[in-house]
């Protein structure tokens, strides 16, 4: 979804509500992650005293393969994001929180996807203390383990 920002930039007090989904077709293009459904986006962009701020939440479910034990599962996520939209950056307002828009338009799908992917951990585990698989026999050590350790001892 592309949000048109011209009115937002020009009129103090102007507000745009976002209620939108990024569909599976678009999400299938994301490398390295499998989404179990669409990403639901809800939020507002508002011009307060000439500053346009964007606040939104993104909710989605990822289909994950645990990095250690390879079990597959679904996990729900909900993230909140906040940005300030500007037409151009000057040296005194440079910050990650600023989003520079071109032609007074914002590609909301792209922004939300980037925000979400950056918020995810680099390692996906089924649980914090996942014991993983035995390097010898491949047994799932979360399920009680195997006898490999005994034989070495
Ligand atoms: Zn695991
Ligand atoms: Zn083993």
Image (spheres, grey):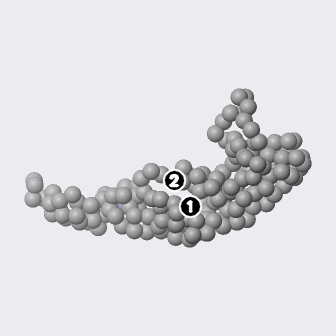
Characterize the local packing of mark 1: few (<14), some (14-19) or many (20 or more) Cα atoms within 10 angstroms.
Answer: some
Instruction: Give the camera-side residue of 59 and 102.
Output: 102
Which callout, 1 or 2, points at the residue further toward the start of the chain? 1
Residue occupied by mark 1: 77
Residue occupied by mark 2: 120
Q: Residue at point 55% right, 65% down? A: 27
Q: Residue at point 58% right, 65% down? A: 26
Q: How far from the left and from the top, in percent, is residue 100?
A: 71, 43
Disc 1 or disc 2, which is closer to the eye?
2
Picture quarter containing residue 61? Answer: bottom right
Q: How far from the left and from the top, in percent, is residue 91?
A: 71, 28
> On the rendered structure, is 40 left or right of 76?
right
Q: Residue at point 48% right, 51% down? A: 121
> On the rendered structure, is 52 left or right of 119?
right
Q: What element carries label 1?
A: strand
Q: What count of labels does the image hold?
A: 2
Are the residues at dot 1 and dot 2 in contact (C-beta closer than 8 Å)? Answer: yes
Instruction: Give the camera-side residue of 13 and 150.
Output: 13
Q: Residue at point 40% right, 58% down? A: 125
Characterize the local packing of mark 2: few (<14), some (14-19) or many (20 or more) Cα atoms within 10 angstroms.
Answer: few
């Amino acid at each position: 979804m592309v949000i048109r920002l011209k009115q937002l930039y020009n009129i103090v007090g102007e507000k745009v509500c976002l209620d939108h989904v990024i569909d599976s077709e678009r999400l299938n293009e994301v490398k390295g992650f499998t989404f179990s459904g669409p990403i639901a986006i809800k939020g507002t962009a508002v011009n307060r005293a000439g500053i346009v701020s964007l606040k939104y939440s993104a909710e989605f479910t990822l289909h994950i393969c645990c990095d250690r034990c390879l079990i597959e599962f679904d996990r729900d996520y909900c993230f909140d994001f906040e940005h300030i939209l500007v037409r151009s950056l000057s040296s005194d307002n440079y910050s990650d929180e600023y989003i520079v828009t071109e032609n007074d338009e914002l590609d909301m799908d792209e922004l939300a996807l980037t925000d979400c992917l950056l918020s995810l951990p680099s390692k996906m585990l089924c649980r914090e203390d996942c014991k993983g698989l035995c390097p010898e026999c491949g047994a799932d050590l979360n399920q009680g383990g195997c006898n490999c350790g005994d034989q070495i001892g």
